[in-house]
Amino acid sequence: MNKVPMTVVGAEQLRKELEYLKFERRPQIAEAIGEARELGDLKENAEYHAAREEQGLCEARVRDIEGKLSNAQIIDVTKMTNTGRIIFGTTVTILNIDTDAEMTYRIVGEDEANIKENLISVTSPIARGLIGKNLDDEVSIDTPGGLTDYEITAVEYI
């Protein structure tokens, strides 16, 4: 299997979700199935079918998280020397050369990505264009809005 790159925070979030699903959500669903069974005929019992569907979704998510954690390659950039090179887990500030707009992103795994928190997936066009570049480099990145030129103004290993 392929290794799944993940930050320390991302791995901890997945572990917490897994714990919740196994020890809180599973018992809740089992209780709902039991209550629905008591209502009688299972063929026409909407509560029973909804609870069974919820159980299937929960178990699928448990398997997904367990698979990702078993193949996780946890990368902690805080323990690395900052060389100014952009790698997975670094926080990067870039300046759009055309508009002078400055943006700061942290490059994280796919499960951790959240654009509202400026966390971008390592597989996103911007992250792919930045990985391997260095502080003060100018890069042209093919984004959904077209080719955009950026200057890398800060690289932090935090």
Image: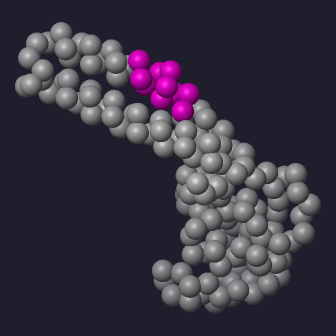
Q: Position of residue 76 (x, y in %)?
A: 79, 51
Q: Position of residue 142 (x, y in %)?
A: 56, 85
**Residue 136 vertical position relative to residue 44 in the rendered view, above or below:** below
**Residue 74 vertical position relative to residue 147 in the rendered view, above or below:** above
What sort of colour scheme is used for the picture?
Answer: one colour
* Left or right placement of residue 31 versus residue 5 in this view: left
Q: Is residue 113 visible from the viewing direction of this image? A: no
Q: Main secondary structure of the magenta part?
A: helix
Q: What quarter of the picture does the N terminus occupy?
A: bottom right
Q: What quarter of the picture does the C terminus occupy?
A: bottom right
* Left or right placement of residue 116 versus residue 49 in this view: right
Residue, x 62% and y 65% (percent of image)?
A: 122
Q: Nearer the viewer, residue 57 or 10?
A: 57
| Figure quadrant of residue 81 | bottom right
Q: Nearer the viewer, residue 97 or 9?
A: 9
| Residue 90 lies in the magenta stretch | no
> Over which residues does the magenta segment extend?
18-27
Q: Which residue, as the protein is rendered here, is positioned at the far front?
A: 1
Q: Position of residue 62 (x, y in %)?
A: 47, 36
| Residue 24 lies in the magenta stretch | yes
**Residue 129 vertical position relative to residue 45 in the rendered view, above or below:** below
Residue, x 88% and y 57% (percent of image)?
A: 80
